[in-house]
């Protein structure tokens, strides 16, 4: 009996220490190529607006710890950019365009993308005569919309913004139609129905001077919850479709695997990018986010990739719930001004490694979906195969990876909590393998980066053979480039081409 009990205790102990296994199978089905990740430099983000460039210095470029490469800025309802910046809410004397210049210049110097979004066109173009959205007592609840007789003025007004920025050293890469056209607000805003946006783009978007402004791209209006009606109406109209380069939206009230996933297939069909241009997870809470909330942010990033997103732009750069600390005493300790916060390191897993990659298909042995306890995605970038894995539980697992190619070496990037936000360790691989088991710690965000073994028999796939052939690169005007940098056109040996972003 004593022998039997000893055996049972030994078995029980083995059960405790042995981690459960989650199997992830990665296949070579190719989805979207990811342009990048970023944040907004809008009013309130920089504290004070426009004069402090420390956030972008900490966050942007390959030399930074985080690796952001897209910056969003507001196109204020203005005509010239040399007036004094008034208090927020003074709609009769709109804030100017120069506030974003210092940060935008740094982002561009570091090879990044900058784009502008109007919260409102000039008040004199609107039905309520003000940049204010109209949902306020002093507006008599009069809906602020772009007057039809001013549709022809809208894109020339965007041209004046582009001209001002160019003359002051910033080549803007893209401009949007409108911030949240479906949200009636008491701050700067403008309402459009999907049909009104279609009429504006279809009949007047040709007036955007793309040739003068280096092929500037046009982004659709950015609805509050990524309502597909806004993008679908544009993309189903041949004339409007030719004018739109990027469809965009926000995630308020609608997680990525809902509306954005519904909108993405039509965009992919017509070769358009899909950008999530504003959201904040645990926004404006009265404390610093805990680690579980940081993992929920990681899941949102992952779910955006699974939904077909090519660009993810967070809300403010600097806030106690964002990427860079504000120094506000009520949120200390852990909120020191101009220091990187845990959420920035979560973002770095994607910004540093997924930017420029192409997503691959994955299948897991566990059920996944919005805010699952386990999530995964996979990517290929050059000779690298990247697998992301998120575990939100208190349990550690073994992660069995079945890969489409043999790999010969690897690294594990791990974030587990505020005191262990960015750890890196090698993955021991003695000889090229196509299956292996790696650790998945409890409550962790993991990036596994493998070097593909090009010499192995697994790389007989024609698509990888083509990928190894020399490529040619051109700027957006078709001029040859010796070295790809920023947004450019990549052409394969077979003549196929695509727009890609190189963060070098």
Image (tube, rainbow, N blue to C red):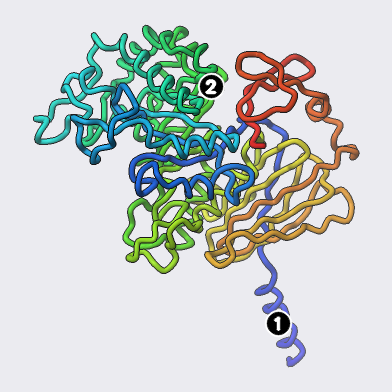
Which label's residue is closer to the chain start, 1 or 2? 1
Residue found 36% across the figure and 30% down from its top: 97
Using residue 279 as the reference point, say whether residue 428 is left or right of it: right
Using residue 260 as the reference point, say whether residue 195 is left or right of it: left
Can the viewer see residue 31 in this picture? no
Using residue 120 as the reference point, say whether residue 490 is left or right of it: right
- Please identify the quarter of the rendering in which residue 222 is found: top left
Q: Which-is-in-front pick, marks 1 and 2?
A: 2
Using residue 133 as the reference point, say whether residue 169 is left or right of it: right
User: SS for tag 1?
Assistant: helix
- Please identify the quarter of the rendering in which residue 132 is found: top left
Can the viewer see residue 7 in this picture? yes
Q: Quadrant of the N terminus?
A: bottom right
**18 relative to 315, above or below:** below
In-front residue for pair 17/431: 431
- Identify the mark at residue 8; answer none if there is no mark: 1
**74 relative to 439, above or below:** above
- Identify the mark at residue 272; answer none if there is no mark: 2
Residue found 28% across the figure and 37% down from its top: 85
User: SS for tag 2?
Assistant: loop
């Amino acid at each position: 009996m004593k022998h039997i009990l000893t055996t049972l205790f030994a078995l029980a102990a083995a059960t405790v220490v042995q981690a459960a296994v989650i199997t992830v199978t990665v296949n070579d089905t190719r989805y979207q190529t990811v342009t990048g990740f970023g944040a907004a430099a809008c009013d309130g983000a920089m504290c004070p607006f426009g004069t402090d460039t420390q956030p972008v210095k900490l966050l942007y470029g390959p030399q930074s710890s985080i690796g952001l490469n897209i910056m969003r800025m507001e196109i204020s309802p203005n005509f010239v950019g040399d007036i004094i910046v008034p208090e927020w809410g003074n709609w009769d004397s709109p804030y100017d365009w120069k506030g974003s210049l210092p940060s935008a210049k740094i982002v561009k110097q570091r090879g990044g993308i900058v784009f502008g979004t109007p919260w409102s066109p000039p008040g004199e173009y609107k039905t309520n005569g003000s940049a204010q959205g109209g949902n306020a007592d002093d507006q008599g609840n009069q809906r602020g919309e772009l007057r039809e007789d001013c549709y022809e003025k809208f894109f020339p007004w965007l041209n004046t913004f582009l001209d001002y920025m160019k003359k002051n050293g910033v080549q803007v890469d893209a401009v949007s139609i409108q911030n949240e056209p479906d949200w009636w607000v008491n701050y700067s805003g403008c309402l459009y129905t999907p049909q009104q946006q279609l009429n504006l783009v279809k009949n007047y978007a040709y007036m955007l001077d793309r040739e003068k402004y280096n092929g500037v791209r046009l982004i659709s209006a950015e609805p509050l919850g990524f309502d597909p009606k806004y993008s679908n109406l544009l993309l189903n109209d041949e004339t409007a479709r030719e004018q739109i380069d990027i469809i965009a939206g926000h995630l308020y009230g609608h997680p990525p695997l809902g509306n954005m996933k519904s909108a993405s297939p039509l965009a992919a069909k017509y070769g358009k990018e899909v950008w999530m241009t504003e959201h904040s997870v645990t926004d404006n809470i009265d404390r610093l986010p805990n680690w579980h909330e940081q993992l929920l942010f990681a899941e949102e990033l992952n779910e955006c990739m699974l939904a077909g997103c090519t660009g993810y732009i967070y809300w403010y750069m600097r806030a106690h719930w964002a990427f860079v600390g504000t120094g506000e005493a009520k949120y200390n300790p852990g909120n020191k001004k101009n220091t990187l916060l845990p959420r920035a390191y979560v973002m770095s897993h994607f910004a540093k490694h997924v930017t420029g990659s192409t997503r691959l298909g994955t299948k897991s042995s566990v059920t996944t979906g919005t805010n699952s306890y386990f999530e995964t995605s996979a990517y290929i970038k050059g000779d690298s195969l990247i697998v992301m894995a998120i575990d939100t539980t208190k349990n550690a697992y073994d992660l069995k990876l079945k890969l489409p190619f043999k790999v010969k070496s690897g690294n594990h990037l791990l974030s587990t909590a505020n005191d262990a936000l960015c750890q890196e360790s090698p993955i021991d691989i003695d000889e090229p393998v196509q299956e292996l088991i790696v650790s998945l710690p409890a409550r962790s965000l993991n990036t596994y980066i493998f070097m593909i073994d090009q010499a192995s028999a697994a790389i007989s796939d024609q698509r990888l053979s083509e990928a190894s052939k020399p490529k040619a690169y051109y700027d957006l005007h078709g001029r040859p480039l010796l070295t790809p940098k920023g947004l450019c056109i990549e052409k394969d040996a077979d003549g196929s081409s695509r727009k890609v972003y190189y963060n070098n």
